[in-house]
Amino acid sequence: MAKEITAVSHNSLAAGTTIKGEIITDNDIRIDGRVEGNIDCKGKVVIGQSGNILGNIVCTNAEIIGSLSGNLKTYDVLSIQSTGKITGDIQTKTLVIEPNAVFNGSCKMSGE
């Protein structure tokens, strides 16, 4: 009997690329370009240092190294790195903010 192998897929948007519209994915995504629209991700969203999002994000986990202008809801962990910038409201279970990170908005934390 053959053993089933499950491949893990990752999405990536390179620097210098702009998407205007909604992104819906079941897999992790890393954004180093610009997105003008909402992101719905069942995995982890990473906004790279050159990444810029203008829209709302709903995901399981997020790591913000670049910038987000919009609301963000994570079901588990949100990490804002020292170069990260969020302008908008966040909702998360666990929040990690490094020194020099920028966050302007309100925060709601819950185990839900």
Image (cartoon, rainbow, N blue to C red):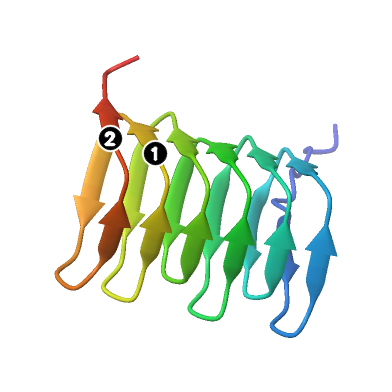
Residue 87 in the image, given as x and y percentages of width and height: 41, 54
Kindly indicate the quadrant of the structure image that contains residue 24. top right
What element does badge 1 sit on? loop
Image side of residue 8 versus residue 51, left or right:
right
The residue singled out by tag 2 in the image is: 107
Residue extending furthest toward the left: 99
Kindly indicate the quadrant of the structure image that contains residue 3. top right
Q: Residue at x 83, y 58 (%)?
A: 20
Residue 23 in the image, given as x and y percentages of width and height: 78, 46
Q: Residue at x 35, y 14 (%)?
A: 112
Question: CB atoms at circles 2 and 1 under 8 Å apart?
Answer: yes
Q: Residue at x 79, y 38 (%)?
A: 4
Residue 48 in the image, given as x and y percentages of width and height: 52, 73
Which amino acid is tagged 2? Cys
Residue 65 tag number: none
Which amino acid is tagged 1? Asp
Measured along the vertical axis of the image, is residue 16 above or below residue 75? below
Image side of residue 82 versus residue 50, left or right:
left
Count of number-bearing discs: 2
Comparing 67 with 23, the one in front is: 67
Q: Residues within 10 Å of mark 2 (few under 14, many from 20)?
A: some
Kindly indicate the quadrant of the structure image that contains residue 85. bottom left
Residue 89 tag number: 1
